[in-house]
Amino acid sequence: MGGPGEAGCNGGPRRPPPGLLLLLLLLPALALHPGGPHNVTLELSPGWPGPGPPPNVLHVWAVGTQSTVHAVWSSERGVPTGLLVATDRPDSVLHINWTRLLGADPAGSLTLQPAASVRFAAVLLLTKLFEFEEASSSGPSPYPPYPLTNFSWDQLGPTLNASALTATFRGRLAADPAFARGGLALRIQAFAGPGRPRLPPRLRHVAGSCGLQLELDGVVPRGNRSLFRLELLTLSLGPGPPPRLEVLSSIDDEYSPAVFRLVRLLWGSPTGGYLQWRPVAFSSPGAERGDALPARADAPRPATGETPPSLLLRAFFGPGPYPDLAALNLSWGGPDGAAYEDHRYLSWSALLGVGTPPSDDFSPLVLGITATALGAPTLLLLAGGLALLLLLLRRHSEYHPIN
Ligand SMILES: *[C@@H]1O[C@H](CO)[C@@H](O)[C@H](O)[C@H]1NC(C)=O
Ligand SMILES: *[C@@H]1O[C@H](CO)[C@@H](O)[C@H](O)[C@H]1NC(C)=O
Ligand SMILES: *[C@@H]1O[C@H](CO)[C@@H](O)[C@H](O)[C@H]1NC(C)=O
């Protein structure tokens, strides 16, 4: 896959035919936002009895008119893990038995009630961070991976902002000098309504979805022009196809110049849930266009080897084994353009949610240009056609009583 810069030069913007454009113009007006308005709450370790500071368990909770979406994130006792659960009741509740969760066997200590209301669940484990020398990125890495199991994580509490609906997990390998002044951050942002973040890649979100931003900041690279790769493991509830990767052509507009694709990891059929992103990462916090670097994803495949410890996986999915666990790699960086080492910074963002993922609608600028380009003649023609159709229909209904 080419870099975001390349996409503009090679393919050029692929313009949909005018008919399609018109249809797309009308679509946003017809599209309904799934579930309507959501009441979103962020809470730390619900029901934590103490003593001591609450463990790093974040509960995000979006109540719709007929459903609830629960997302739970934790960095406790194992790799950082996200759990996404959709229920078909507005009053479903997350229950954590803390004694059991933090005891020797956490299996079954995290449930949603009523249990029968659960219609979808998936878990996402962030397991290992690999580093490559750019030149050797296709072969094995010359450097040992950083296992996220061994990371130590800051307390989540102070980062939680209940009104902005954000919280950030910050972790590092405490014993490794490369992490002396840096680390990995996982920022969670819940969304109560539709919109787009201020900074590129300005991924569109909908009510009840959950944004995540991964940030590698200040970690000393071990090679020249290091590329990074993150391994994810995932599992969803119940039968159904294994998770799959889908790449969509997107629209070039001022939200995401020259990035034409949306990539999504989909669970279930029909789609139960998704993780969606644009194939781009940034090597500066400002996400300047010149600091964009390609983000690549490999198709998921059955996970092999030992499953790393994950508190939420065990707590919700039971003691295992997990034969349907799938693995995929995300890689950031390419042979030219921006690189992590420019600012020792890398950021990548994605959206996690249930149901059908939001596709990109047109920005007002593109809408304006399209409307002008299509021009009044087309609209007149369309109005004329519609009027004729109505006339015919009415005639038909006038004849009807006679039959
Ligand atoms: C929590 O789990 C412990 C240990 O399994 C059990 O003894 C206790 O009854 C449970 N508490 C609740 C409220 O279910
Ligand atoms: C990085 O590049 C410098 C200069 O080109 C070279 O001396 C050094 O050995 C390289 N480091 C690694 C880890 O390849
Ligand atoms: C991810 O990349 C690492 C390092 O190249 C490799 O060892 C591992 O097998 C890959 N995992 C998957 C699922 O492709």
Image: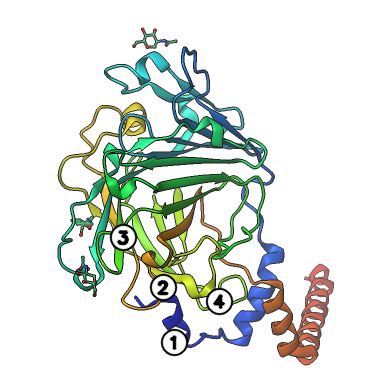
Q: Nearer the viewer, residue 51 or 4?
A: 51
Q: Could you tell which of marks 3 and 4 lies nearer the N-terminus?
A: 3
Mark 1 CB near ligand 3 (8 Å cut) = no
Residue 257, disc = 4
Question: Which of the two discs, 1 and 2, sits closer to the camera?
Answer: 2
Q: Is residue 260 visible?
A: no
Instruction: Say which amino acid is labelled 1.
Output: Gly
Q: Could you tell which of marks 1 and 2 lies nearer the N-terminus?
A: 1
Q: Residues within 10 Å of mark 3 (few under 14, many from 20)?
A: many
Instruction: Say which amino acid is labelled 4.
Output: Pro
Left or right: where 231 falls relative to 291 = left
CB under 8 Å between callouts 2 and 4?
Answer: no
Mark 3 CB near ligand 3 (8 Å cut) = no
Q: Residues within 10 Å of mark 2 (few under 14, many from 20)?
A: many
Residue for badge 1: 11
- Furthest-bottom residue in this view: 377
Label 2 sits on a secondary structure element that is loop
Q: How many marks?
A: 4
Q: Could you tell which of marks 4 and 1 lies nearer the N-terminus?
A: 1
Question: Which of the two discs, 3 and 2, sits closer to the camera?
Answer: 2
Residue 284 percent location from the top left of the image? 49, 64
Question: Which of the two discs, 4 and 1, sits closer to the camera?
Answer: 4
Residue 87 percent location from the top left of the image? 52, 35
Residue for badge 2: 338
Residue for badge 3: 228
Residue 305, disc = none
